[in-house]
Image (tube, rainbow, N blue to C red):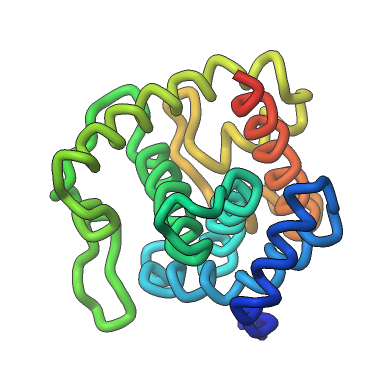
Amino acid sequence: MKTFLSPLNATEEKEYLRRQKEGDEEAKKVLIERNMRLVAHISRKYQNAEEMEDLISIGTIGLIKAVTTFQEGHGSKLATYAARCIENELLMYFRSKKKCSREVSLYEPIGTDKEGNQIQLMDIVEVDEKDVAERMELKSQIIRLYELIPDVLDEREKEILKMRYGLKNQSPVTQREIAEKLKISRSYVSRIEKKALLKLRERFEEG
């Protein structure tokens, strides 16, 4: 697996956060790059449930959201906040695989970890009253994302996301399978997927 850069120290992180808040895109890029180890760490727990590279791709979307929306002084560190966003992005993915049209049991198995132990959705989220509310909000957000797809994405992007996440009652497939079907490279599929997800994220955050 790719080797990621080491995390920023507290002083460096504070400086880059300040610069990013002032609109410095390079600072934002550094914050993302220097927190990729966190994405890999969280994704590694589920690497037997899905291809590791795919999980990192999905988790990176959560990291980008965290870096973009993090606010200092709210009682949490960037890494803590980012971990939550990454986990939520992975949860959104697994829920999509199980079809958004029905409620998914928290005890439903979604794969196994590297030790061969069964992974359930319960293992992805902490279960308390706050998380119940967050899961309800997440379901609402997923429905809204479905509604945005026709307006935000072009035909190729819609086609790839439809296959990738099992939309329209299809079975989700890997980037490699999509590449073979469309006769394009896997890296190109990955780029289109990331671009499409970012477009949806940007429109979603516009309200």
Q: Which residue corresponds to the image point at 30% horizontal and 73% vertical from the top-left?
A: 113
Q: Which residue corresponds to the image point at 22% horizontal and 60% vertical from the top-left?
A: 123
User: Does residue 44 appear left or right of residue 106 in this picture?
Assistant: right
In percent of width and height, residue 75 lies at 40, 56
User: Does residue 104 appear left or right of residue 155 in this picture?
Assistant: left
Question: Is 141 drawn above or below residue 70 in the view shown?
Answer: above
Q: Quadrant of residue 96?
A: top left
Q: Return the residue nearer the eye: 206 or 3.
A: 206
Question: Is 64 drawn above or below residue 151 in the view shown?
Answer: below
Q: Which residue corresponds to the image point at 46% horizontal and 56% vertical from the top-left?
A: 81
Question: Is 63 drawn above or below residue 151 in the view shown?
Answer: below
Question: Is 69 drawn above or below residue 153 in the view shown?
Answer: below
Q: Return the residue nearer the eye: 194 or 178.
A: 194
Q: Return the residue nearer the eye: 76 or 106.
A: 76
User: Does residue 202 appear left or right of residue 95 in this picture?
Assistant: right
Q: Return the residue nearer the eye: 189 or 35.
A: 35
Q: Quadrant of the N terminus?
A: bottom right
User: Does residue 128 appear left or right of residue 17 in this picture?
Assistant: left
Q: How many marks?
A: 0
Q: Quadrant of residue 101?
A: top left
Q: Quadrant of the C terminus?
A: top right
In percent of width and height, residue 70 lies at 56, 49
In percent of width and height, residue 107 lies at 14, 49
Q: Which residue corresponds to the image point at 57% horizontal and 38% vertical from the top-left?
A: 163
In percent of width and height, residue 184 lies at 81, 51
